[in-house]
Amino acid sequence: MLGLLTALTAPAAAYDVVTVPDGGVLQGTVRFSGTPPRLEPTTVSRNRDVCGDSKESEALVLGPESGVRGSVILVGGVARGKQPTTTDVVLDSSKCLFVPHVSATTPGERGRVKNSDALVHNPHGLLGKPTVFNAKTTEQLMRPDGKIGHTELRVGDSLIMLSEASESHPATPVMLHVYVEDVDAAFERAVAAGGTVVSKPTNQFYGDRSGGVKEPSGNTIWIATHVEDVAPDELKRRAAEAMKGGG
């Protein structure tokens, strides 16, 4: 599956929402000036029997009169104005491409990955260069209403099963515990991606270093790295000490 670019735009930190009775709208077309570069096709690394060996590069796509498709304009220096209007971002995996290739939204808004291909793809989320999550979809079954009935995601060597909420199975908060190679780095990425700190990474008596965040949907995710093998007798002793302190 080819990579996607999601552009995040947001008002400045000191932005105040006020009533704007006579506000205007910025509109126009971004055009490419000069001779467009010759872009090499993007090599397909997986599922070539379905997706082919390559796809045309979408790094620069020009329309009529050299209009740049997927352009995002960020207007800076605006301290107050009307409430930004956004819509849910839906990224559709269609014909081994993400459609649309570029989307814009504001921090805190929800995005959804839809799969229109018969082949189940692997969405990979990034915040800049660091990976925020990399869940490989290994199985997916859709309900007649188009919502996900069953999905299996693999994170590292862990398997997570989930589905979309329905009237018979309403959404409920969950607590998830995930082992990673570097808990401190993963914790910082999770907070930067919108998670609320539940507990900062700390060395635990049972040999893990762990911390917790609550993601925007209300689910709590505990992130851990195993740092020490603790013998059974020593584990009992440490547990007893921890219980004395209310741990």
Image: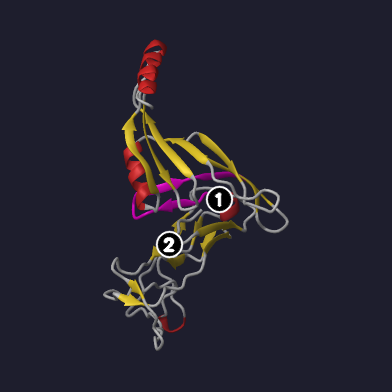
- For the image, the number of numbered tags is 2
Q: Secondary structure at mark 2?
A: strand
Q: Is residue 155 magenta?
A: no
Q: For the view shown, which residue lies furthest in the left direction? A: 77
Q: Is residue 11 visible?
A: yes
Instruction: Return the residue nearer the eye: 92 or 10.
Output: 10
Say which mark, if any, is on residue 6: 2
- The amino acid type, in three-letter code, at marker 2 is Thr
- Return the x and y of residue 72 as percentages of the image width and height: 39, 72
Q: Amino acid at mark 1?
A: His
* Quarter of image, res 105: bottom left
Furthest residue to the bottom?
22
Left or right position of 128 against 100: left
Q: Locate the C terminus and report the quarter of the image it occupies.
A: top left
Where is residue 115, by image quadrant? bottom right
Mark 2 Cα shell of 10 Å, populated few (<14), some (14-19), many (≥20): some
Please state the horizontal and vertical placement of residue 180, each as a whole percent of the image: 40, 36
Q: Quadrant of residue 74 in the image?
A: bottom left
- In the rendered image of this protein, does residue 3 appear above or below residue 162? below
The residue where tag 1 is placed is 121
Indicate the secondary structure of the residue bearing disc 1: loop
Q: Which residues are magenta?
A: 121-139
Residue occupying image coordinates x 52% and y 44%: 136
- Relative vertical location of residue 149 with respect to residue 155 in this rendering, above or below: below
Q: Residues within 10 Å of mark 1 (few under 14, many from 20)?
A: many
User: What is the image's colouring?
Assistant: secondary structure
Q: Position of residue 156 (x, y in %)?
A: 47, 37
Identify the residue at image location x=44%, y=52%: 125
Residue at 40% over, 69% down: 60
